[in-house]
Image (tube, rainbow, N blue to C red):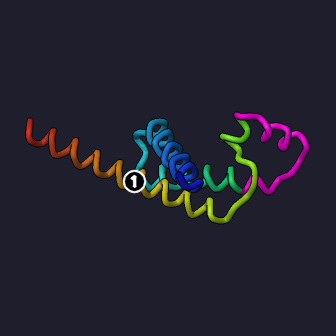
Amino acid sequence: MPLFIGDILWALMVYFIMRFLFVTRPVKFIVLASLLFCYGIEFSQLYKSPWINDLRHTLFGRLVLGEGFLWSDLLCYTVGVGIGIWVDKGLSNRLFARSSVHA
C-alpha cells in the first residue's frame, strides 16, 4: 500500500471527527477546521525541540504528530478532506432522499 494512503485516511478521519464534534456547524466550517488542524500538525513538524522530538519517538507521537515535514502531505490532507466532503454529501443526499420518501 502506498505511504500516502495513510495521510489521506488520517485527514478523512479528522474530517469526520470534526463533523461529529461540530454537527450543527456548516460544512465550510468543518472543512476549514479540518484543514487547519491537519496543516497545523504538519507545520508543527518543523519545530525541533528535544521534548517534542522525544514525544515523536513514541507510538502516539508518530501517529498523531508525525515525524518529518513533507509538502506532499499537505496535498494528501486536502485530498482526504475532499473525500470526506464527497462521502458526507453522498450520505446526506441519501438520507434526505429516504426521509422525503417516507414523509
Q: Nearer the viewer, residue 89 or 25?
A: 89
Q: In the rendered view of the protein, which quadrant contains the C terminus?
A: top left
Q: Is residue 76 magenta?
A: no
Q: Is residue 87 above or below residue 64?
A: below
Image x and y of residue 45, in percent: 76, 53
Question: Would residue 70 be found to the left or right of residue 2 on screen?
Answer: right
Q: Amino acid at mark 1?
A: Ile
Residue at the limit of the structure toward the front, as seen here: 1
Q: Visible in this render: residue 47? A: yes
Image x and y of residue 37, in percent: 61, 49
Q: Residue at x 91, y 43 (%)?
A: 50
Q: Is residue 15 above or below residue 28?
A: above
Q: Which residues are magenta?
A: 43-59
Q: Nearer the viewer, residue 29 or 75?
A: 75
Q: Is residue 52 magenta?
A: yes
Q: Residue at x 84, y 44 (%)?
A: 53
Question: Would residue 7 be found to the left or right of residue 90 on screen?
Answer: right
* Mark 1 lies on residue: 85
Question: Would residue 98 be found to the left or right of residue 53 on screen?
Answer: left
Q: Nearer the viewer, residue 46 or 31?
A: 46
Q: Residue at x 28, y 46 (%)?
A: 92
Q: Is residue 80 above or below residue 53?
A: below
Density class for disc 1 (Cα within 10 Å; few <14, some 14-19, many ≥20) is many
Image x and y of residue 62, in percent: 71, 41
Circle 1 SS class: helix
Q: Residue at x 42, y 51 (%)?
A: 84
Image x and y of residue 65, in percent: 71, 44
Q: Visible in this render: residue 103? A: no
